[in-house]
Image: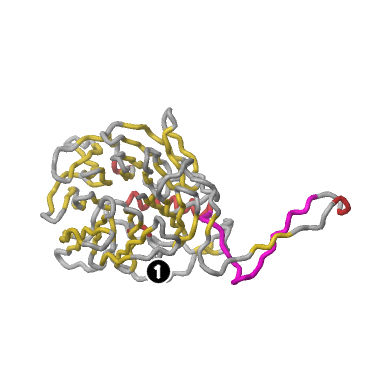
Amino acid sequence: MGRREPDERPPIEVLGADLGVSSTQQVAVGPRRKPGRRHRSLAIAGVVGVLLVGGFAIGGSDDGDGDEDRVIEDERDNRARDDLASPLTSTTVRRSTTTSSTTTVPAGPPLGRPVEGALVLYSANRWQVVDLETGEIYDLTLPSSEPYNSAATHRGIVVTVDGVARFHPILGTGPEPKPLDLGPADVVMPAGPGRVWLIDSPPEGANAPNVTSDVRLVDTSGDVLRSFQIPGRWVSDATADAVVLSRGGRVYAADGDGVRAIATGWSVGTNGDAAVVVTCDEAARCTLERQPVDGGPSTVIADVGDPDSQYLESFEGPAGELALLISDPTGADQELRLFAPDGGGLGTVEIEIGSVSTGARWLPDDLGLLVGTNRGVEWVRPDGKGWSMEPLDLDEGRRAEFFFVVTP
């Protein structure tokens, strides 16, 4: 997760796929995954293949120059020419030269009713914003081509570019938000509304003994709220008050008052003030547990069959809900298990084979959650009998390698 030089490899030519833009497609190469996440890497690799075959449909392209007019002709029918009552008509469309971004005419709120917030999509080196109130879709000018080390926070998104974290306000700012530098970082993790953790690690290959990383808790105005160091380069997850490390089969929490062991096993996410941990007992029976970062007693969330034959990743909701994504090492067989804030089961959603590509993001106002699949961004929502799953209505079907939900 250290800083890397830009990827100078040539673009990949995709044959036999109607991409809707050109015969070649630039494919971003994500950063190296941290130890303990090998199953996720395989799952992502399998689904990226599906996306390449299906095409990255994330909006149209503009191949024209400047103010060039293009003529859209009405389609002729099959009647004889003497049956036509009027000559062929045409419509002239003027292309704007005031901005490099494109905007889609709103098709109405994609969630069925106006919701204050935005969906930020990334695919093929392109960022787009979907306004959840109006349905308007527009290109977003961001310098980062690697969204994996970014995080959504209050009213915006924090991305890392060349070892520096920058906050980009999204709500109410338009396609070119003015960024604010937050300081050096290779990785950023959410820490509650308006705050993020910044992890600044030594360059990869620096194998000196006792390697440490700098950790800072900052708000989106740039103020540093806390600063300390942790051993090693890797942070697994983070709560509002501590970062979580998985090392040597144990889980640790660090908050500036030292590093303390809180569980055996490894972390797969966070939930409120706790790490979500896979741990096994003396008889090798494994469970998923909610382990408070202050070292308090843990709570069993669910049984885990064979943790070595599946990948587990959890996603926290705004009110403490939890979605557990379970997949085999190839990502071919996947499901979402949903839990209430008190740990009670809310149901299971089966995912189509090879569909999940980017995990899940919860929506506000008990609207459920969004999942990235090869059909686009899909909406998992309660339907009175359980949970239904359908592609989100974005006017044009949009798929995303990565996406964020930004709320006030």
| Three-letter code, disc 1 | Asp
Q: Is residue 305 visible?
A: yes
For the stretch drawn in magenta, the main secondary structure is loop
Residue at the image position 56 percent from the left and 62 percent from the top:
61
| Drawn side of residue 55 relative to residue 383, left or right | right
Residue 70 drawn in magenta: yes
Q: Compared to 224, does 270 lie above or below? A: above
Q: Is residue 215 visible?
A: no
Residue at the image position 52 percent from the left and 46 percent from the top:
108
Residue at the image position 28 percent from the left and 40 percent from the top:
320
Residue projecting furthest to the left: 257
Local packing at callout 1 (Cα closer than 10 Å; few below 14, some 14-19, many 20+) is: few
| Drawn side of residue 26 relative to residue 79, left or right | left
| Drawn side of residue 279 relative to residue 148, left or right | left
Residue 377 percent location from the top left of the image: 46, 47
Start-end of magenta stretch:
55-77
Q: Compared to 350, does 69 lie above or below? A: below
Residue at the image position 34 percent from the left and 32 percent from the top:
346
The N terminus sits in image quarter = bottom left
**Label 1 sits on residue:** 7
Residue 118 percent location from the top left of the image: 42, 51
- Visual colour scheme: secondary structure
Q: Secondary structure at mark 1?
A: loop
Residue projecting furthest to the front: 172
Question: Splitting the image into 4 quarters, where does residue 145 fall?
Answer: bottom left
Residue 279 percent location from the top left of the image: 21, 41
Residue 111 percent location from the top left of the image: 46, 42
